[in-house]
Image (spheres, rainbow, N blue to C red):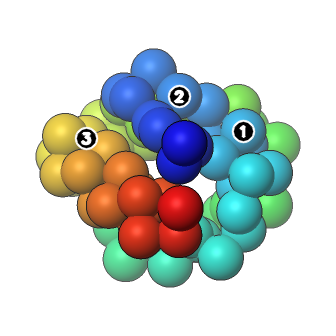
Amino acid sequence: MAFSVTKDTVIGDILDVDFDCAPYFLEIGMHCLGCPASRGETIEQACAVHGTDPDQLVKNLNDYFSSKA
């Protein structure tokens, strides 16, 4: 079964599973992925800060992980 994310999934946990998904965060303007504060945020929190749609990021990430299963 593929790894699955929700709006409540912590970004650091996602990157620990597969850092190759980092471009999905970079494209929403989240360029501080190594920062402890950003790694501790949920997808929903990060999207609120960056003014982007958390549902779209969740979909993109889940599509990415599904394709790797």
Contact flag, marks 3 and 1 (Cβ < 8 Å) = no
Between 30 and 60, the residue placed more toward the observer is 60
**Where does the N terminus fall, quadrant-wise?**
top right
Residue type, label 2: Thr
Q: CA distance from mark 3 to mark 2?
A: 11 Å
x, y (%) of residue 53?
Answer: 17, 46
Q: Residues within 10 Å of mark 1 (few under 14, many from 20)?
A: some
Q: Position of residue 46 (x, y in %)?
A: 44, 41
SS class of the residue under badge 1?
Answer: helix
Residue 27 lies left or right of residue 53; in this view the side is right
Mark 3 vs 2, N-terminal side: 2
Q: Nearer the viewer, residue 40 or 61?
A: 61
**Residue at label 1?**
13
Q: Residues within 10 Å of mark 3 (few under 14, many from 20)?
A: many
At label 3, the amino acid type is Pro
Q: Which mark is residue 9?
A: 2
The answer to whether residue 1 is above or below residue 24 is above
Between the residue at mark 1 and the residue at mark 2, the CA separation in whole angstroms equals 7 Å
**Among the 4 quarters of the image, the one containing residue 6:** top left
- Upstream in the sequence, badge 3 or badge 1? 1
Q: Which mark is residue 54?
A: 3
Q: Position of residue 58 (x, y in %)?
A: 31, 45
Q: Hey, what amino acid is under mark 1? A: Asp
In contact (CB < 8 Å): disc 1 and disc 2: yes
Give the x, y percent position of residue 37.
73, 38
Q: Nearer the viewer, mark 3 or mark 1?
A: 1
